Image: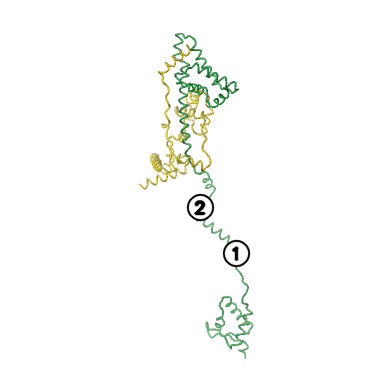
Amino acid sequence: MSEQYKVKIDQFEGPLDVLLHFVQQAEMDIQDIPLAAITDQYLQYVRTMQELELDVAGEYLVMAATLLQIKSQTLLPVTADEEAWIEEDDPKEQLIEQLEEYKRYKEAAGKLQQKEEAQQQVYKKPLSEWSTMEEKEESLPEGLTVYDMVAAFQKMKERAKNAHPPQATVRADEYSVEDRMTEVMGELEQLDACSFYQLFEETRTKPQMVVTFLALLELMKQKQIRCEQAHNFDDITIQLAEKVKV
Amino acid sequence: MKREKTIEGTLESLLYISGDEGLEAEQAARALGIETKTAREHLISLKEAWAQREGGLQITQAENTFFFATVPEAAEAIEQFSEQQNRQTLSQAALETLAIIAYNQPALRADIDQVRGVKSDRALQTLLSKGLVKEFERTQKPGRPMSFVTSTRFLEYFGLETLEELPPLEDTEQPEQADLFFRELYQDEE
């Protein structure tokens, strides 16, 4: 018995809810309720609550008192004067009105609950984050354009370039000036004279040309060869210095 | 015609940005530099267009506030996808309190307590903190008690466009039956 009540206590929303439960349990209309029977049931319920040492809210006791008052009134003979008074301010009628009103709103609450359930099937995204966007704007100086950003980017690139100076790969000499000097001297030994262009005919690569040129300059400096040019831009005739002397 | 399309397109963008805060017709009108009435008409026309589209999104309305929302048909998949459910519901006490305010606004704390037969302070506090009801004004009654009304959030929360859409309160009062009750009651006691 007490087990049964324990469960119910949590469900009820107050004395009116308890009464309404008894009325509905009896499958009766509020207007037709056997109030005496309901009163007994209600008192038993409140007593059980007390037995279970649950804090019985004051409202439950007020309701118990009201029900007892109604019950006692029906048992006492009523004088004509009192009848007029009862008509006006009848606790029975008040209670019934209250019960009906409560029932209306309880039902309305039930309908709201259905709507709540239906609406929870519908999802909305949160408001787009304005706050963070605003904060970022505040921390920036005003009047900046995209060109300022490009300029900044270019400066950065400049700095990066200085931080890494250009690199060049130095290759080991494939043709040494000394070797080329010997070669040129050998050729000049065989020939009386050799033209400048002729010396470059065999050279294919830039390094070879450079080395040949340097070799000639070096030979000239050492006065081992003589170079003659008739006119500007003419071919240059190269001879061994000793041959010229001889 | 092209201008109309631009307005509705912009409104659509504003709706998207507004999310669950909703877009008020008045706010939208200010942003677009048009009349509130015009903005409202366009928002309603947009709402209808999205309803006709029968896609995965809908536009819902609570009075003058409009929302982009998913459709109920997608709820199951959404819950699967996000691995959580949006199921924090109001207590019975809160629902009853809310119903009393909704049908009697502006309502006093005393009205609520009277109908429910118990103190409803906690339930009312919950509703206030959830923004479903708001303080309306101090009445001229003794003690100048505060009166309460439902908010736009209330309409949104229950998927109502206006207060008129509240399900009608069932009228169980049948005065002619009162006499019958008395007769039966007295018979009962005898």
Residue that extends furthest to the front in the rendered view of this protein: A1
Asked if residue B69 can be seen in this view, the reply is no
Up-down relation of residue B40 to residue A5 (above or below) = below
Host chain of mark 2: A
Residue that label 2 marks: A144
Instruction: Name which residue type carries label 1.
Output: Pro
Circle count: 2
- Left or right, B5 with respect to B75, comes to left
Letter of the chain in yellow? B
Which x, y percent locates residue A226? 60, 85
Residue that label 1 marks: A165
Secondary element at tag 2? loop
Q: Residue at x 60, y 69 (%)?
A: A169
From mark 1 to mark 2, how far is it between C-alphas? Answer: 32 Å
Q: Nearer the viewer, residue A45 or B28?
A: A45
Q: Nearer the viewer, residue A157 or B20?
A: B20
Letter of the chain in green? A
Up-down relation of residue A76 to residue A56 (above or below) = above
Earlier-in-chain disc, 1 versus 2: 2
